[in-house]
Structures are given as C-alpha cells and as structure tokens.
Amino acid sequence: MTVPSLPPVPHPSDSDPAPDDSPRLDVFPADFCWGAATAAYQIEGAAGYDGRKPSIWDTFSHSPDATLNGDTGDIACDHYHRWHDDFDVAKSLNLNAYRFSVSWARLQPTGRGPLNPLAVAHYRAQLERLRALGIRPFVTLYHWDLPQELEDAGGWPARETVDRFAEYAARTAEALGDLATDWITTNESWCQAFLGYGEGKHAPGRRDWRAAVAAAHHLNVAHGLAVRAIRAARADASVGTAQLIVDFVPASSSPADAAAARRWDAYHNQTFLGPLRGGGYPADVLDLYREDGLAELIRPGDDAVMAEPIDFLGVNHYQQVVVAHDDDGTPPLRARDIPAEPALTSLGWSVKPESLRNVLVRVAGEFPDLPLYVTESGASFDDYVDPDGNVLDQERVDYLRRYLAAAGDAIKDGVDLRGYFAWSLLDNFEWAEGYRMRFGLIYVAYDTQARIPKASALWYRDLITDHAALPRPA
Ligand code: FCB
C-alpha cells in the first residue's frame, strides 16, 4: 500500500510567522521520540473476533446508562482491520514513535494460560510493520481491559489478579519481546482503581472505596512483577509505567487549602508514584487510607516489588486542578475543586501549558536520573469536517504548540525528557464519554471509517520535519 497523500490544509506555518509561544526546537534532543498514543479498547473494535473474549469494558459499556449514548467499543475505529493503513498515515505524519496497548482479553482471553495464537500473530504483524516503517513501538500491557473472567473472580481488589497479570506479562513479553524494546506495564492506575472500583464511572463500575484502595495496591504490585517478567524475557528491555499526574494547586495560601491539595496529590499522584521510589507508601498516602485497610493488604516483599527499578517513567498529563478544603466533603479527602476558568477543552479540562512544565519538573525532582516521557498529552475539541473536507482544528494546533513549548521549557530546566506522545493518533472511544469527545490528530468519520488528518496533524508533521532538519554537531 502506498502512503496516502494528505489534503492541502492551510495551517499557521503557511502564512503567519511562528507565534512567540512556539516551542524552541533546538532544545529537544536529536533522538527525541515524536509520537502519538492509543489504547486497544478505544480503537480496535473487532470485539468478538479471533478468539477475543469480553473484558470489563465490553461488559460495562453494554450496561444501561454506563456510557454516553450507550456507545461501546464493539467497532470503534475498526483499527483491528485497518491498522496497516493507519500506520501508513502515522508514517506520513513523520511520527518516529507510537505508543499502543495490546489487549489482554485478546491475547489471553480468559486471563489465564497460554496466549491466543491469533492475537500473537496479529500483534507481531503490527510490530514488524512498525519496525519496517521506522516507527519505534512503546507497548502498553494494560490499558484497563481486564478479562471479564478475572473480574468475575474478584477483579483488581483480589490479590489473585496480581499473579494473573504477572503471568500475562511474562507470556506476552516472551511472545513479542524480540520485536519491542520499550514496554509500559500499567496505564493510569488511578483511573482503573478509583474510577473503576470507587466511583463506578469506568469499568467495572463498582462503587466501593475499600475495593478501590485494594485495587490500587494490587496494580502497584502487578506493575513491579511485570517489570521483572519483561526483563526476564528480554534482558535489554526498557520498562516503565505511564501514570496520570495532575498538577494540584491550592485555592489560597491558607494552610487548610494547602493540606487539601496535598491530600489530593496523595490520592491521585503519590498513591502510584510513592511506592515506585522505594520504602513503601509515603506517610501522606498511608494516612489517607488509614481506615480503608491499605496497611493490612501489604504483604512482606511488596514494597520491594513495587520499587523494582524502572528505566523510565511515563507522565500522562491533562489538567491543572485548583483545590480547596471542604468541611462537608467526603472523608478522607474533604476537598473540592474550583472550576477551571477558560480556556477549556470540550471535556471541560483546563488549558494551562505551564502545568505540564510543573509536573515534569516535579516528577524529575522526585526521580532524579530517571528519563521521562510524556506518554499522553492532548485535548478534545468539537472538531468537524468543513465543506471542503478539511478539519481545521486551530484550537488543537494552539494547544500542541503551547504544551510542546512547555515541554521544551522543562528540558531547559534540566528535565531528561525523551519523548512526547500526543493523545491520540485517532479520534476514538473516549470511555464513558463515548465517541463525542474527539482527541485525535486524525479525524475518524465513524459512519464510513474514513480518516482525515486534521490541521493539527499536519502542524505536528511539519514540526517533526523541522526538528529533524536542524543542523547537528558532527
Ligand atoms: C487518559 C486515558 C486515555 C484517554 C485520555 C483522554 O486518562 O489514559 O485512554 O482516555 O485520558
């Protein structure tokens, strides 16, 4: 198949001089990964194909009132059948890296035992093609699609799931490890644990705070065991995890608001970052879950497993959140967020590029010597195809420009940042928000499955081209 030619879409660099808040390209290392990210359930579709069995997201999205308009990932972007063309488009955008997740429910449909050979063949073909295209794959093992049979056996709140994940990681790394060096164990454990088991907004839709705390601990241990399993399969693997890091800012200088922001930081960020550093959970985190049985869940050896050395840390960043103390708030958090001011994305998330710099500088300070990647960063806007067939998403162009400038500022501050993965390569199934929220660089017309690179995709392509063309010392 030939690389599709892209439509001639006007975008800022055609006419205007680069705005002052454009990224300084020379601060990005020559081998910087310019990528985009996706996740299996959000794009693959082909839910019942080739031996795949249901995951918790199939069950949840088919439950009444779980997702906007009852949307499901049954078909999604049909990427399972269209990946070859999608990779050609990615190549035409000059991406040199691509982060995607393999589906646990496809590779190991019941969550136990040998891998499904059809799924192994599928992902091996994808990895081989990425290699041929010169696109470096970053393989995520777990982006929230727990096999339903494991949920029926207790799910993440059950310790048994940790062992199942370790087995899945080992078998997958053995099956695919010769074709991929860069591995991400878990994605955004906070969302899985607390949105999935605490708030019930994500699969599996449970509302049980203690179960959520148990899920969080088990995801942390599962991560550590997966690091070991991947290394055992491929000694030179580079392994990390991708965690959601929110920039929490106290609403005022009052000690109460500062303490509230610290509690939210413990809850969202440190529950997952803390144990990676060694020495177990930080005091703030243990305090937060004092009534919820965290301490009793920790088995001898867990602290060391959770702190298994990693090669990089993936930062998924979307929001700055302003936090105020709230006496009436639910314990133990007793905090509320102050709604963000404009500018906002269509999901109502704040647009504050400096927050990306803040979190990168902060995480780099907490993990000296550990390379960082921005493994997700992006925004949803109300994109549409105009009468000429173009998607002129100027807001996303501005967003990317300003966030990449902030990433460049973090590098100037001394952060060892190795790559940036725009969320997302394609518009896709945005979990409980269904298909309404469009995050893609590439527009997906779900009725025809046509792909249209948006103006932001072409802007990103040109930026990558310009970066590659910078003169480098010999
Ligand atoms: C992150 C998820 C990703 C996507 C973006 C918008 O929390 O990891 O799958 O939904 O948000």
Image: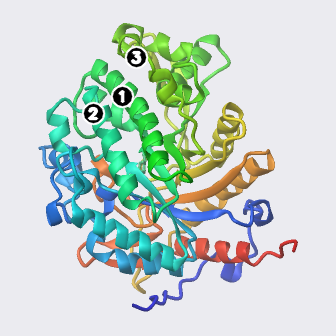
Whether ligand 1 has any atom under 8 Å from the Cβ at mark 1 is answered as: no
Q: Residue at x 38, y 55 (%)?
A: 174
Can you say whether 158 is above or below 129 in the image?
above
Q: Residue at x 73, y 45 (%)?
A: 415
- Disc 2 residue type (three-letter): Thr
Can you say whether 11 is above or below 171 in the image?
below
Q: Nearer the viewer, residue 124 or 64?
A: 124
Query: Which x, y percent locates residue 284?
Result: 54, 15
Q: Residues within 10 Å of mark 1 (few under 14, many from 20)?
A: many
Q: Residue at x 53, y 21 (%)?
A: 324
Picture quarter containing residue 458? bottom right
Q: Residues within 10 Å of mark 2 (few under 14, many from 20)?
A: many
User: Which numbered disc, 3 or 1, marks the residue that appears first in the sequence?
Assistant: 1
Can you say whether 120 is above or below 132 in the image?
above
Quickly name the residue at label 2: 161
User: Which numbered disc, 3 or 2, marks the residue that appears first in the sequence?
Assistant: 2
* Circles 2 and 1: CB atoms closer than 8 Å: yes
Q: Residues within 10 Å of mark 3 (few under 14, many from 20)?
A: some
At numbered mark 1, what does the secondary structure look like: helix, strand or loop? helix
On residue 464, which mark appears?
Answer: none
- Disc 3 residue type (three-letter): Ile
Picture quarter containing residue 100? bottom left
Quickly name the residue at label 1: 218
* Circles 3 and 2: CB atoms closer than 8 Å: no
Quickly name the residue at label 3: 298
Q: Nearer the viewer, residue 215 or 227?
A: 227
Whether ligand 1 has any atom under 8 Å from the Cβ at mark 3 is answered as: no
Distance between mark 3 and mark 2 Cα atoms: 15 Å
User: Which numbered disc, 2 or 1, marks the residue that appears first in the sequence?
Assistant: 2
Q: Nearer the viewer, residue 79 or 264?
A: 79
Query: Which x, y percent locates residue 40?
Result: 33, 58
